[in-house]
Amino acid sequence: MNIIFAIIIFSIIILFHELGHFLLAKKNDVQVNEFCLGLGPTIIGKKIGETKYSLKLFPFGGACMMEGEDEASDSDRSFRKKGVWQRFSIVFAGPFFNFIMAWFFALIILCAVGVDEPIVNSVIENSPAAEIGIADGDRIVKLGKKNIHFYRDVTAYMFFHDGEAVDVTWEHDGERYTKELVPEFDEEVGRYLIGIRGVASRQKTGFFRSVQYSFYEVSYWITTTLKSLGKLVTGQLKMNDLSGPVGIVKTIGDAYTASKPSGGFYVFLNLLNMAVLLSANLGVMNLLPLPALDGGRLVFFIIEAIRGKRIDPDKEGMVHFIGLVLLMLFMVVIMFNDIRKLFM
């Protein structure tokens, strides 16, 4: 069942990503030869108009194959014949549609169960928070220059700024206060703490505020992904902390198992929350300026626009091919690491 749920979630996310490429290709009059879900041999396919729609054997992946995208073509409707900003919009649409999907799924969740507002449930005695005057029931408004919308924002900020002093702004009885807060290292848990606990329940905010908070939700996951990548680059996170498809399947399975006793509605919401995380994550990862990714292709388009001259397609193709090989090797390492963690 875990694998089935994972395949469904992955398929929806990838399908929507490729739909972004597809719709913008059609809008810019680019011929789409095939639109497929999955990779490998075709299980079933049907040609409608100029486009073949197909389902492939291996469920992880998908493609929007455009005329002249990876090879020379004399067609006026080929990808390479279009202007640089037309090509830019087509490639950018994939990751952008992932953010749209994440926003829409977040809206469903927030309308259903509400927001984990940054309300202090309890303050630990003699903690840094207690010393500056934060009390039970106060609302955290700002940490440094970061506006706080969810209690998760507080937790994430302290994780990514571990041990750093920060100016905290909070509301108490309708008044706002700002003071410097210096976290203290807790030997028992092995990390810096500020001494507050958030509420476990969520507060419903109504439809229109849920729309607003859905943007905050997507922003939260985008920021978390980028800062996690930053920690990986600086060595604060290790390769062991990364997860690939195998690890994600396990995480989805854990979410299903944990929510199953609460009923199908909560299973649905938890899996939807996983889809928000993964869709936003895929959008960010695809926009990284690395060869073979959408972000790498966008870099070439920007360079082309600046210099007013197209880069040799063969040279660009070679760069993306090398990037693809390195990406596949990286995925093999991550998958091996995922499998190893299953037996630890």
Image: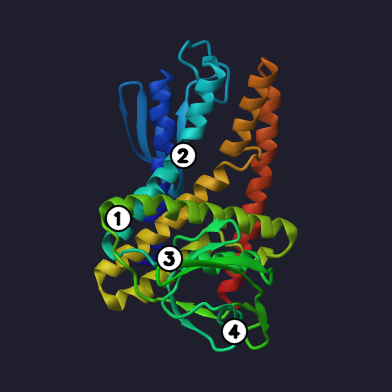
- Label 3 and label 4: CA atoms lie apart by 36 Å
Which residue is more in the foreground, 47 or 13?
13
Q: Quadrant of the N terminus?
A: bottom left
User: Which residue in the protein does label 4 denote?
Assistant: 127
The residue sitting at 63% across, 36% down in the picture is 296
Residue 4 seen anywhere in this rendered image of the structure: no
The residue sitting at 39% across, 36% down in the picture is 19
- Label 1 and label 4: CA atoms lie apart by 37 Å
The residue sitting at 40% across, 56% down in the picture is 275
Name the spot of residue 272 as percent of width and height, x first.
Answer: 35, 59
- Label 2 and label 1: CA atoms lie apart by 19 Å
Of circles 1 and 4, which is in front?
Answer: 4
Of circles 2 and 4, which is in front?
Answer: 4
Of circles 3 and 4, which is in front?
Answer: 4
Name the spot of residue 341 as percent of width and height, x first.
Answer: 59, 72
User: Which residue in the protein does label 3 denote?
Assistant: 252
User: Which residue in the protein does label 2 denote?
Assistant: 96
Name the spot of residue 326 as percent of width and height, x first.
Answer: 69, 46
Amino acid at the residue labelled 3 = Ile
Say what secondary structure mark 2 lies in: helix
Count of numbered labels shown in the rendering: 4
Q: In which quarter of the image is the C terminus?
A: bottom right
